[in-house]
Amino acid sequence: MNIALQTPPVSAKENPSSVGPEEGTPPNEFTKDVIAGLTAPQKTLPCKYLYDEAGSRIFEQICELEDYYLTRTEAEIFSSHLPDIAKELGTGVTLIEPGAGNCEKAEPLLAIMESPEAYIPIDISPEILLGARARFEASQPELLVRPVIGDFTQMDRWGDEEPGNRQVVFFPGSTIGNFTHQQAQNLLQHFAAQMAPGDGLLLGVDLVKDSVVLERAYHDDRHVTEAFNKNLLRRINRELGADFDLDAFSHRAFYHPLRQRVEMHLVSLKDQQVRVADLSIPFLEGESIHTENSHKYTLESLASLLNKAGFQQKHYWTDTNNHYVICYAEIF
Ligand code: AVI
């Protein structure tokens, strides 16, 4: 099954092994996606490509920013409610984490869960997963850790589960927000197809809030998000031999209240032509490349998404400002 349309990051660390085109070789997926995106009426680039090695490092810096409240707030909710959350997940559970990255969010959760059966982190980066497994061997030697290397959006099965074990899918970080509503529903349905009634989903989601707070998070005054966005052009220059002038584009991020999402764009500061993989792409002054959506949910729209995907919300935990929610749902 292939549920991926424009997939957001499959982990916090995108596959660094993708290479630029060589003469005579068929264009790779990156080349095809970039050309398709830049020749569309509204120019666009899939946000998963923001996460090359440099992009992943910049994203880590974003997570440390005062303005970017998401990571900090999710961590606060976890630390305030960890025993409660662990109790809700139950005993003897296999915890599966798609796009686990370095697994650091699962570690304290697994440490407090009652007799977890196993932990299955899924990521495209073997190095990160093996490093995380070594850490678990030291800190939680009794826990069975079975890393799965691959793109979870493309996976039919995430392991050879013993029938009867309860599974809980752990999907923190508001990554679900980078999918359109339809893609998010497809993804959750894809998870559900590998689960049984009573299995759970622990999801971290950013909530609709004051647009000033939202826009500051994606247009921080230290310009780290700008660097993150523009790094995509640097990557296209490097990997596809393009000639984007980074100073001729500006970073734009705004909240779209009807679509309930923050959109990230790169706006051309002048009329210009950019050479990308043998094509000359025209830009008008003010024309933008849409590089990312970050959807925000209300508690109601989240419950509705979960329902459409076959889950029923059981419990949720928010911060005192109601900026962010961690939600536990089960397959019905
Ligand atoms: C990974 N994802 C949840 C981040 C977000 O907030 O949508 C990506 C990001 N883009 C700009 N800043 C952070």
Image (cartoon, rainbow, N blue to C red):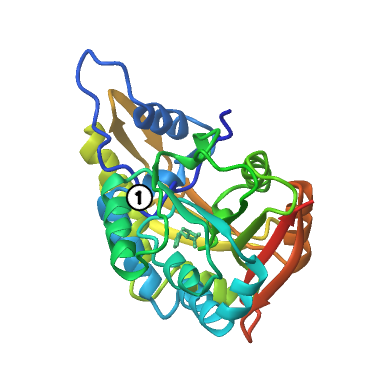
Residue at the image point whose x is 53% and y is 39% from the top: 42
Whether residue 317 appears in this view of the structure is: yes
Whether residue 249 appears in this view of the structure is: no
Q: Position of residue 150 (x, y in %)?
A: 40, 39
Q: Position of residue 75 (x, y in %)?
A: 49, 76
Q: Is residue 11 left or right of residue 238?
A: right
Quarter of the figure with the N terminus: top right
Q: Is residue 20 left or right of residue 145?
A: left
Q: Residues within 10 Å of mark 1 (few under 14, many from 20)?
A: many
Query: Which residue does the numbered mark 1 point to in the structure image?
Result: 51
- Above or below, comparing residue 305 to residue 283 in the picture: below
Quarter holding residue 229: bottom left
Camera-nearest residue between 153 and 92: 92
Residue at the image point whose x is 32% and y is 56% from the top: 133
Q: Is the residue marked 1 within 8 Å of ligand 1, measured from its CB?
A: no
Quarter holding residue 161: top right
Camera-nearest residue between 144 and 122: 144
Residue at the image point whose x is 64% and y is 57% from the top: 201
Disc 1 is placed on an element classified as loop
Q: Position of residue 181 (x, y in %)?
A: 67, 48
The kind of residue on which mark 1 rests is Tyr
Q: Position of residue 266 (x, y in %)?
A: 42, 51
Residue furthest top as drawn: 24
Q: Is residue 306 left or right of residue 251?
A: right
